[in-house]
Amino acid sequence: MSSLAARMAAPLTFHGSTPVIPAGRLPGAGLRAQLLWLARVRVLWLLAGFALVALIALLRIATLGFGGQAPQRTSMEEALLPPRGEITDRNGAPLARAFPAYALWFDPAAMGDNGAPLVRTPAEVSRALKEIFPDIDEARMTRRLASGKSGYLRRRILPEEANRVFALGEIALEIPRETDRYYPQGTLAAHVLGYVVEDQGGKLGMEQVLEKRLSHPDKRTEPVALSIDLRVQGALEDELRKGMLATNALGAAGIVLDVDTGEVMALASLPEFDPNTAGAAGAVNVFNRATNGVYELGSTFKPLTVAAAIDAGVVRDLGRQWNAAPVPVGSRSIKDSHPLGASLNVPQALVHSSNTVTARVADELGPERMRRAMIDLGMDRRPFIELPAKGKPIWPQGNWSRVTNMTVGFGHGLAVTPLHLASAYAAMVNGGIWRPATLMKLAPADVPQGRRVFKESTSSRMRQLLRMISLYGTGKSADAAGYRVGGKTGSAEKAGAGGYNKTSLVSSFAAAFPMDAPRYVVVVVVDEPKGTIASSFQRTAAFTSAPIVGKLVPRIGPMLGVQPDDSRDVDISDLRYLVGGDKE
């Protein structure tokens, strides 16, 4: 090879990115080819880089779009958001909200690794804290400080308390500012709301039900409106508490329900608890008697039995006389609490609360139709409500026998919650439509269509009969002037291991108002009332639960847009003579 050819074939060297032509080498076709190849390589690397960036961007978009991860917020954005959404009543009054709070934290390492955790002795510091927080256990606090274990000494301390702790000069006693859950109404609607445990979320009530919504970063700025009316809730709890204390009862429950929408305007269970003081260890009195307690609700079932019988055509003539003598069933017999005569018509049976006549009506209706009516009213399953605490009814299994059918007819042998009863009465008086109860405020377009369980004509007749009971029967003490209250009492012995306990009653009253155009159902249940001076030494519903309704309705009527009107009432002129009434 010639020297020129050797120089042309020698490999290229570069200075940076610029090729260096060897001395004596002449540019030619080979050099141009190598330069062209180099340019192509560089373009390919550039295209590969762009493709890699595009691929990474596409993968990130796919991750965000399909992986469900929300964009990360800046610390400033996070600080501006409340950590948990607010809960309000239907009118916007706050029921639960987040607010800045102080806590007392012990950090034994604050003085340094080699220093003592406290300036003074644990006993001296405990004594000083006792002066600030009189309710603490000084001996336990001393042991806690001496242990050298970090952690909370107290949650929810007031600003003035924080200032006094700071004045002690103990660096290990830190006062972090945190966000706390606060219930401005105290114990009001406690069983509806539940409470929140730090780092665990909502417990019980709507705090638990709405956990995802209240804690969602994009939704927690929007208050959640419940169906309850704070004013009605307060009145219900106040009257329940008065009635419970007046009769030395174990507890009480109450519900105010919109008959056309299923919205719960108030729901209470007593005794109550304070959600502000509930924590990880729970709280006392969290059992919800209104939605979780199941009871045999006695004679409040009698109107439901009569309604089913009217609907089925079993009761056509209200003037028909039914045998009121004891009903023999096997070795036993069904009796009335006191003799009511040889025979009664259906209106008289309701006014005087006859077990025997109601049992015979149920017997003629038959087990299958009675069972079907109870299923249609939702009595065979847990109540329909958002709350997690929902009692399972004690439902007779299998085919109902004749005696089961008759006893269910007057409210025994089947145990349900007060909410079951409220929903059933709403259907009985609103034209025959059953709707599920709800604790969420509903827009008109969101009201469920419901299902028909009674004919409209049956519902109309039952409004007359319920009003008649309040005028002439056991519900007289619930009749509030101008509000046209109608309802039925129920007094049932509580079942125990050895049978029914004659000294323990559950007294209840189920009502609706105003009966000429029903708007609301009110159910009150008193658990084991005692005969006291306030109840004329009686334990039955006519003297214990019905008077609560009589005092409650005039308080809540105007709040709910129902004004007293003595010029209006249900027309019961065709029934008055059947019960021997002479009230005009």
Image (tube, rainbow, N blue to C red):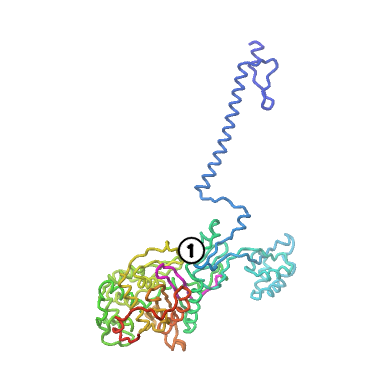
- What residue lies at 49% left-to-right and 77% top-to-bottom? 235
Who's the residue at 59% across and 31% down the image?
45
**Residue 503 sits in quarter:** bottom left
Q: Which residues are magenta?
A: 254-275
- Compared to 583, does 171 lie above or below? above
**40 relative to 425 in the view: left or right:** right
The furthest residue to the top: 2
- Picture quarter containing residue 483? bottom left
Q: Is residue 147 magenta?
A: no
Amino acid beneath label 1: Val
Q: Please rate how many residues cluster around mark 1, counting C-alpha atoms within 10 Å: few if below 14, some from 14 to 19, many from 20.
A: some
Q: Position of residue 553 (x, y in %)?
A: 45, 78
- How many marks on residues? 1
Tell me if residue 267 is in the magenta stretch.
yes
Kind of element beneath mark 1: helix
Work out whether residue 515 or residue 132 is closer to the camera in this orientation and state it. Answer: 515
Left/right placement of residue 504 relative to residue 330 reads right
* Place of residue 162 in the rendered image (x, y in percent of width and height, measured from the top left): 68, 68
Query: What residue does disc 1 label?
Result: 209
- Residue that extends furthest to the front in the rendered view of this protein: 567
The answer to whether residue 61 is above or below residue 150 is above
Residue 110 in the figure: left or right of residue 397: right
Q: Is residue 27 above or below residue 393?
A: above
**In terms of depth relative to the viewer, which is nearer, 514 or 175?**
514
Q: Quadrant of the N terminus?
A: top right
**Rendering coords of residue 281 (x, y %):** 55, 69
Quarter holding residue 414:
bottom left
Pinpoint residue 44: horizontal percent, then vertical percent. Answer: 57, 29
Placement of the C terminus among the 4 image quadrants: bottom left
Say left or right for 328 vs 33.
Answer: left
